[in-house]
Amino acid sequence: MDVSPLRTLFVTIFFTSVGLLADVRWVADNLLLVMGLVVAVLLVKTVVAFVGFRLFGQTIVHSLAAGICISQVGELSFVLGQLGASKGVLDAGTLQAVNSVTIITLVLSPLLVATAPRAARSLAKRLFRLRTLAKDTRERTTQPKLSGHTVVAGLGEAGVAFVEALAEQPGQMVLIDVNPRVVHDWRAKGFEAQLGDATNPETLVHAGIASADLFVVAVSDHESARLAVVGAKQANPEIHVVARARYHRFAPALDAAGATVVVDEERRVGEELAREALRCRQATL
């Protein structure tokens, strides 16, 4: 189901309601205070995020860019501000300052995200030596570019059986699942596992679908499987796709989406039942 229209509607309602919280006259009377707070918030959050990303092994430029992207104040501040005002913790002026800074930083978010890579590179060159930046990039960017690998979406029973069966075969595999615990467990086993939804094109791109040779769709939900196949074929029309059809009636949709091979689960089970029944019958003769 495509929920994009609903998302657009709710975003519109959200920003309309947020706009009603701002007192334009108060902002105009306290413009220097509001702008100072906006700058302070953006700087502090960028620095804190930069430190956090650096601790997790990201490069200087990537850490700065990520810090700039998430430097705005989140929507939760509206809820906390209203709660603080109702409890008498925040006076009317402080509440207006919180709402004004939040609204302005949210409005600036698209601009911050769009300019973050270029701004991060420019800022990094001003704050660090070029030799330091080059060395940092070499040391931190150690993951080789994926090519000719297999991408597996869904680490349920079917996905696990596939991975275990091919674990000893040559070639790298990238595993995708929406369960953080499952992803953590497979990473602990030494596999390249990524947290994400295979129906999201960005998740597939991050898994290197454009340079992969094989895409195995082992998710049980038929619509998710179909969307994953469509996304993979759009990103890499030449990729071979093996998709799981949980029910026979959904197999044609996967075939129409571009799957190279559709494993019809109900039909395969029926065939296996027939083989076992014949084997048992022959054993009794």
Image (cartoon, grey):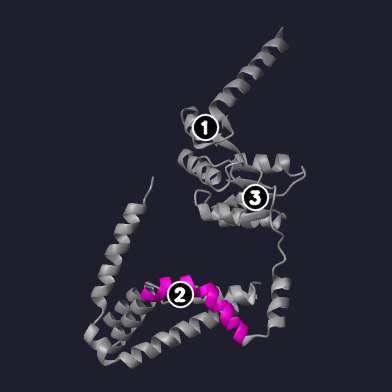
Estimate how packed mark 2 is, as few (under 14), some (14 to 19) or many (20 or more) residues with alpha carbons within 10 Å: many
In the image, taking residue 175 as reference, residue 139 lies left or right, namely right
Alpha carbons under labels 1 and 2: distance apart: 42 Å
116 within the magenta span: yes
| Residue tagged 1 | 255
Q: Label 3 crowding class (10 Å Cα cut-off): few <14, some 14-19, many 20+?
A: some
The correct choice, above or below, for 281 with respect to 83 in the image is: above
- Circle 3: element type: helix
**Residue 89 seen:** no
Earlier along the polypeptide chain: callout 1 or callout 2? 2
Which quadrant would residue 20 be assigned to in this image?
bottom left
Residue, disc 3: 211
Location of the N terminus by quadrant is top left
* Disc 3 from disc 1: Cα separation: 22 Å
Question: Residue 6: horizontal and vertical position, in percent?
Answer: 32, 54
Q: Which residues are magenta?
A: 107-126
First-in-chain label (3 vs 2): 2
Q: Which mark is residue 218?
A: none
Q: CA distance from mark 3 to mark 2?
A: 31 Å
Q: Is residue 276 left or right of residue 36?
A: right
Q: Residue at x 71, y 39 (%)?
A: 165
Q: Which residue is depicted at the point 49% across and 85% down?
A: 44
Residue 285 location (% of width, % of height): 72, 6
Q: Which residue is mark 2?
A: 112
* Residue at the far top in the pictured view: 285
As drawn, 234 above or below 72: above
